[in-house]
Image (cartoon, helix red, strand yellow):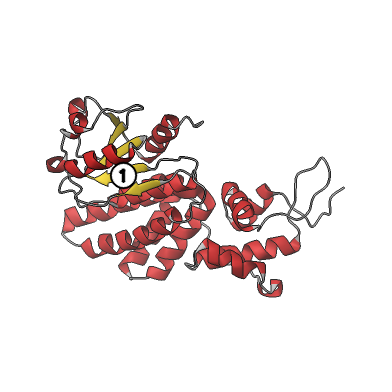
Amino acid sequence: MHDESQITVGELARRLGIAPATLRTWDRRYGLGPSGHEIGAHRRYDTVDVARISVMRRLVISGVSPKEAALIAVDADINEAENLPIVKFEERAEVINAILKALESLDVAFVNEIIRREILANGVTTTWVEILAPTLIKVGEEWSRTGLGISNEHLLTEVLTKILREVSEEIENPINPKPIVLASIGEELHCLAMHALLAALAERNIQAHFFGARTPVDSLVEVVRKIAPPVLFVWAQLSENADYSIATALPAGRPSTRLLLGGPGWDVERCAGATFVTGLPEACEMVSSTLGLAV
């Protein structure tokens, strides 16, 4: 019979606002897992385990990398492991409005904190779909309507890029021997959606390389010829940057590279020879299925 002070991964996830998958990753990578165990029963977190996870959570939310945070948490004084106060939101719209207000007042620390908490609790994909993409749309609509707020868009983009890069850099022992290739094509400067995809794939332990903005078709053809990636994902935010020659320019190979196109710049009816995806969840599913993974 287990100690009443010990809790399951699900109970700890609800208490601290951390996704169960993230807790399991911290256990597997850094040894910050449950120490309580009985034969035939699930492992459970005791009070010391919970305190160390609380330290880990506090450090990650403050911007420390998970690897460094784990080293600190293992040796932390558990008497000082107080949980961060969690701002309670009843609806996702409240989270979006809180971020918008923080941007207006240039409260970058709060924007950082709330986005990191959402990713810890729900993962990159859910946070992107429910929080980040709607927030970016609202910021863009405000700029279109009033001509104001472009600084908010730039600020939010910088914050998100930094956080998403950190997530993508945490991948270890990826499941795919050859990386997925991501790029913004032609003269395309918009890259944030690619950073989101890079981070979301990293959460699935899928390695990808992002070649950045303004990547010419010739360069992508050369990359495919050199490493034969299983998937090439090409982003076009604006229609003038959608270069449809990519579909016929890629070299043939066995197995062939699957071409995925994303972004509002593409005309779906002209995407013959490629697969058009409509959002981050579908992109992750397409990549996973191409690699033969369960989705």
Which residue is at a point 24% across and 53% down the rendered structure image?
140
Residue 190 lies left or right of residue 24; in this view the side is: left
Locate residue 86: give its quadrant.
bottom right
Which residue is at a point 56% across and 66% down the rendered structure image?
69
Please indicate, yes or no, whether residue 85 appears anywhere in the rendered image.
no
**Is 189 or 51 nearer to us in this picture?**
189
Other-residue count near label 1 (Cα within 10 Å), few / some / many at <14 / 14–19 / ≥20: many
Locate residue 240: give its quadrant.
top left
Locate residue 281: give its quadrant.
top left
Residue 260 lies left or right of residue 247; in this view the side is: right
**Identity, as a three-letter code, of the amino acid under mark 1:** Leu
Where residue 48 appears, x then y in whole percent?
A: 73, 64
Where residue 192 appears, x then y in whole percent?
A: 30, 52
Residue 63 lies left or right of residue 58; in this view the side is: left
Which residue is at a point 71% across and 61% down the rendered structure image?
49
**Is 79 or 85 nearer to us in this picture?**
79
**Is 249 or 165 nearer to us in this picture?**
249
Considering every residue shown, the one lying at the far left of the view is: 240
Relative to residue 235, is residue 155 depicted above or below? below
Relative to residue 195, is residue 155 depicted above or below? below
Which residue is at a point 20% across and 52% down the rendered structure image?
189
Counting every numbered tag in the picture gives 1
Pointer 1 residue:
182
Where residue 21 appears, x then y in whole percent?
A: 58, 47
